[in-house]
């Protein structure tokens, strides 16, 4: 019974990211909300574009990635959280003329070109689908921080593109496929995107682009004829665990599959798993992968190690720790009272049937996580809550869910492996005018 409960708790921590619409069963693909509105803005407050709670925010002090605002035409603003200016989102507003699919596609293609030219989008960046409308629903999407999918950025001809798992026409493009722009019927697209950046060298960015080029050239055989890197729907069992390998071995295997040195082994992956493996592979050349032995290529360098649910020491970062990291940046006197906001049920009707089902399944299991949050908010150290973290993480493999990329960018620890760059919000012309006004305020 304990193992079953812990596995269900980990379902929460897996922070499932998006690869399908609301019409598909929750156990097939990851993105089970499909509730984009065509306008990423949600606030009637004159000082905010988005009504984001602290648990959908990042600490202002960690927003250090530079933006050359003169090189792109869109307004940039600091959007404080509802609970305080210490946490929030740095937002670039992108205007789309209407909510039609064609207008959404045009806005996203233009964004991809202009932000790549300005250095806001770079090879290796992770783009996280963000659903601000999931605030005030249930604990499950709150702990996810509203993120539902992880995509991988590459550039070609000076413009940015995305290559995501599932490696199909619903996801791979210039942020203009149905997941991002909608399909006009069952999927209304994604209206807000977080951009987070791995701390990798320019040389690795070049090598990543080469790996993606080879994958695209061979994809019809890899996934069409041989179906080697198809989508993995069991987010609780990472590929390295499922295959009984080390992560070095699975990264090397992916490289060999891309090079078509291995034309038989199956290595299915969910969206964030694919992105994580490609970043780790970017440290290697094709020659190094081809010559690697059974233990895997020594060049493999994961940007961050797979993460536990909650940290047991100061040297760890937890997958479910994101809202807590933001909470701890708010005034100490308000923290304890805000913990229940993360775990309470509000307007659950905003959730898709899939998200609602998962949220209800894990609802009885949130007590332990809430108690740990409350202890930390009350002043307990990571070491003091280690026993609770150990119980929550017991018998569960470390993982790399979509939210791990954002959590990695939120810590002020020297271990920080990612930088939060910005959040893109696709908005109507009226909201765009509001964003232009707010962009006159100071922006980190």
Image (cartoon, grey):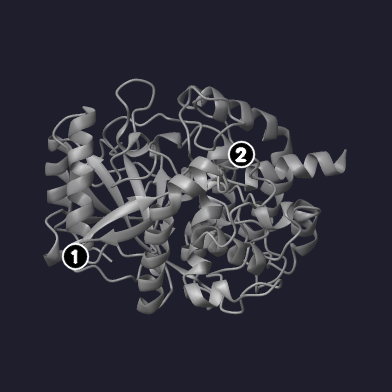
Which is more toward the observer, 59 or 168?
Answer: 168
Q: CA distance from mark 1 to mark 2?
A: 36 Å
Q: Is residue 175 left or right of residue 333?
A: left
Q: Give yes or no for contact between labels 1 and 2 (Cβ–Cβ under 8 Å).
A: no
Q: Position of residue 94 (x, y in %)?
A: 20, 46
Look at 34% across and 60% down and name the residue there.
154
Badge 2: how crowded within 10 Å, few (<14), some, or many (20+)?
some
Q: Is residue 218 left or right of residue 432?
A: right
Image quarter where the N terminus lies is top right
Q: Is residue 41 above or below residue 206?
A: above
Q: Position of residue 131 (x, y in %)?
A: 41, 39
Image quarter where the C terminus lies is bottom left
Q: Is residue 162 visible?
A: yes
Q: Is residue 383 left or right of residue 131?
A: right
Label disc, if present, on residue 357 of the rendered structure: none
Which is more toward the observer, 151 or 285?
Answer: 285
Q: Is residue 323 visible?
A: no
Badge 1: how crowded within 10 Å, few (<14), some, or many (20+)?
some
Label disc, if present, on residue 233 of the rendered structure: 2
Which is more toward the observer, 57 or 207?
Answer: 207
Local SS, label 2:
loop
Give the quarter of the image for residue 247: bottom right
Q: Is residue 108 left or right of residue 267?
A: left
Local SS, label 1:
loop
Look at 32% across and 38% down and name the residue there.
177
Label disc, if present, on residue 118 of the rendered structure: 1
| Circle 1 or circle 2, nearest the eye | 2
């Amino acid at each position: 019974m304990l193992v079953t409960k812990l596995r269900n708790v980990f379902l929460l921590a897996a922070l499932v990211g998006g690869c399908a619409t609301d019409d598909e069963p929750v156990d097939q693909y990851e993105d089970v909300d499909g509730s984009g509105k065509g306008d990423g803005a949600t606030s009637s407050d004159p000082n905010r574009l988005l009504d984001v709670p602290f648990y959908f925010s990042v600490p202002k002090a960690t927003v250090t990635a530079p933006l050359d605002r003169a090189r792109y035409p869109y307004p940039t603003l600091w959007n404080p959280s509802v609970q305080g200016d210490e946490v929030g989102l740095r937002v670039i507003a992108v205007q789309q003329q209407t909510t039609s699919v064609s207008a959404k596609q045009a806005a996203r293609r233009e964004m991809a070109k202009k932000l790549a030219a300005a250095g806001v989008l770079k090879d290796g960046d992770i783009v996280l689908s963000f659903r601000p409308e999931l605030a005030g629903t249930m604990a499950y999407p709150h702990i996810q921080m509203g993120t539902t999918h992880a995509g991988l950025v590459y550039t070609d001809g000076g413009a940015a593109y995305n290559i995501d798992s599932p490696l199909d026409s619903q996801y791979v493009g210039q942020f203009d496929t149905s997941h991002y722009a909608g399909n006009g019927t069952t999927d209304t697209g994604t209206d807000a995107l977080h951009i987070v950046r791995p701390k990798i060298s320019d040389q690795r960015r070049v090598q990543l682009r080469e790996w993606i080029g080879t994958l695209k050239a061979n994809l019809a055989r890899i996934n069409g004829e041989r179906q080697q890197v198809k989508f993995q729907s069991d987010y609780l069992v990472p590929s390295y665990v499922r295959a009984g390998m080390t992560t070095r071995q699975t990264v090397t295997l992916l490289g060999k599959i891309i090079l078509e040195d291995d034309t038989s082994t199956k290595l299915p992956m969910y969206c964030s798993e694919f992105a994580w493996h490609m970043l780790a592979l970017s440290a290697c050349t094709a020659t190094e992968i081809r010559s690697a032995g059974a233990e895997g290529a020594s060049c493999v360098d994961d940007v961050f190690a797979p993460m536990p649910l909650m940290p047991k020491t100061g040297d760890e970062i937890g997958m479910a720790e994101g809202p807590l990291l933001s909470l701890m940046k708010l005034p100490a006197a308000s923290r304890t009272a805000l913990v229940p906001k993360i775990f309470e049920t509000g307007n659950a009707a905003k959730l898709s049937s899939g998200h609602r089902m998962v949220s209800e399944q894990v609802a009885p299991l949130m007590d332990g996580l809430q108690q740990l949050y409350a202890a930390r908010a009350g002043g307990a150290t990571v070491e003091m809550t280690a026993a609770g973290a150990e119980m929550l993480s017991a018998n569960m493999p470390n993982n790399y869910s979509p939210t791990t990329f954002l959590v990695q960018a939120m810590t002020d620890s020297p271990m920080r492996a990612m930088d939060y760059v910005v959040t893109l919000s696709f908005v109507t012309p009226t909201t765009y005018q509001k964003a232009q006004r707010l962009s006159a305020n100071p922006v980190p």
